[in-house]
Amino acid sequence: MGNKTTIPSATRLTKWLVSGPPLLFLLLLVAAPGMITVLASFRYPGEFGGLAPLVAADPQTLQGVTLETYRFFFSDFIYAEVFVKSLFMALATTLICLLMAYPLALLIAHSPKKSRNLMVLLVVLPFTSNFLIGIYAWMIILGPQSALSQMLNGMLHLFGIAPVHLLFSPFAVLVALVYAHLPFMVLPLYTNLEKHDPALLDAAQDLGANAWQRFWRVTFPLSQPGIFAGSALVFIPVLGMFAIPELLGGTGDMLVGNLIKEQFLGTRDWPFGSTLSILLTVAVLLIVWLAVRLGGRGGRYA
Amino acid sequence: MARLELKNVTRRFGDFVAVDDVSLTIESGEFFTLLGPSGCGKTTILRMIAGFDLPDAGQILLDGQDLVDIPAEKRPIHTVFQSYALFPHLTVADNVAFPLKMAHRSREEIRSMMQEALERVRLAGKADAYPHELSGGEKQRVALARGLVNRPRLLLLDESLAALDAKLREEMQVELINLQRDVGITFVFVTHAQVEALALSHRIAVMNLGRVEQVDEPSRLYGFPRNRFVADFIGNINMIAAQVVESVHGHLRLTAAGLGEIVAPTLNGVTSGDKGVYAIRPEQVRIGMHGELTELKNHFEGTVHSLLYQGDVSVYRVRLANGATIEALLPNSAPGRAELFEAGDAVKVGWRHDAGMFLR
């Protein structure tokens, strides 16, 4: 009898030992801060940053809970506009990453097994250098004195077009966003494409499909889970990104990330910053939910 | 309906000659099998017919037309792959409709041809299922329907029954024979399983080391193998080293190691002094008690060395008095162990003189 009772309790212990740490991690570092953010969004800002007290002795000071920050967000279109602009920027980054990553992932997946690992290593190589150094490099490459800018403006001059500034523009932001996130698209795509059974392409060709049809009717639909994973890995972080627009964007290229950062570090309006964070999270969840609904067939036969 | 001709086809991979100067003619409407051990070149031939590989030398002709410049997707030849290669993201109906869509057939035509193909393999009820929801036998039938639906002139089957269990394989064999007869399309089947080849084929080409050893009907291949490889590869056979003493009146007189002098049917081009083997199929060998079997020209005294009981049949190894060991296969026609010989029994083995053969 002793054995029968100790075995289940031992497995229960193992279960807790295995799932405990990540659960604790999620509770302390995701759920709790999330809840704090939600609560903070319903408060008034403190006089010098932070939050106003819930109950203050002086009836003149702001206190208690309020929907003011939400009212404020929806009262002025410029905040929603930053959201929409960020969405488009994230969408554009995702799309460009997808278009660049797909051929690369296909190339790696179709290379001999021996060279595949080396190629994957090359894809993640940019991660070995500091992210900010990469961004500064782009500042130099796109700067007005760079060979690229000089050449481009020289060409434009030939056609009688006024010179352009590459740096501090939405273009520069987009270039750096794509640069920073491309590996996140390549890796899940490659992982997916590598698993495809080559016999399926043989079968498609045998049954009359040319190279283009083999891609569209076999490879592409089968890679949908990879496309979905890669897109999520690019789209979601880009929405919250603030370093790249800060360094490479112009004054008008502010994204949601910058707006939130500004609330906490600039205007010191913690409740509004919290509200923006919450709305961003809700927007991301909504988009992911929509994407799953629309493209949810991907996982069915996996 | 199509006649396929291979003329002196050779394919090399580096120094390895996978297919060595092979010439074959596969008749219209025939169920033709390429049979051989792995690495004998049969799959390479299939891939060259399908268009996935090209011969280094020689020609492949379909109804007289050289296929060399026609890419795989344009050849009127479809393949049923060993792994079936069904498209996992498409339903059974869409899998079967795939070649019809590629051929730009009209919507009505696609629907009716797809329906007909599914009914032919008795899968009309599974049209909306995905491949992962099907059993092995059903997948096999979808692959067949998909291969046949656009009425190719030739259907290639690559080890197509290998993934099925024994019972299912037998059922599929019967279905395959009926299907081929009904549609009248030329089938080229590749397998290493001789039982399958014998059961299914009109004619079989036995291959070894890139060459064709013999092309014949199943019963002739089994009964009159041209050489030792064919005799050994198809079924079981007793082989005893032998030498020709003389060739007289349609008979060969041989001396076989451990059997002494023995008579075999004649073989073209054999002269006295030729060395080879004397071969006899186990099921041709009979076993009797002392004093029996005297009506047979070839009969020898021996003892039962071992017995392998297999239910329907028993395989005996009998050691003969003069040294040779002969395997005999006897049906277990009486119930229980009633009429079985036991190890150590003194017995007599014998066979008709025209059952044995001399092979080089």
Image: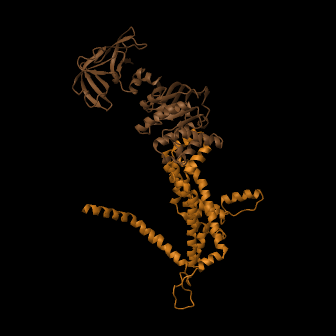
Chain colours: A orange, B brown
The picture quadrant where one finds residue B277 is top left
Q: Looking at this view, is A198 or B197 the one in front?
A: B197
Q: Can residue B270 be seen here?
A: yes
The residue shown at (52%, 75%) is A37
Q: Dividing the image into 4 quarters, which one contains the N terminus of chain A?
A: bottom left
Q: In this view, does B120 lie above or below A148?
A: above
**Residue at the extreme top:** B249
Q: Is residue A203 above or below residue B24?
A: below
**Residue at the extreme right:** A160
Numbered circles on residues, count: 0
Q: Looking at this view, is A139 or A295 the one in front?
A: A295
Q: Can residue B13 be seen here?
A: no
**Residue at the extreme front:** B335
Q: In this view, does B304 lie above or below A31?
A: above
Q: Looking at this view, is A16 or A103 the one in front?
A: A16
Q: At which x and y percent is residue A86?
A: 62, 66
Q: At which x and y percent is residue B212?
A: 47, 25
Q: At which x and y percent is residue A19?
A: 40, 64
Q: At which x and y percent is residue B288?
A: 26, 21
Q: Looking at this view, is A70 or B91 the one in front?
A: B91
The residue shown at (25%, 30%) is B337
With A289 as the anchor, is A5 left or right in this view? left
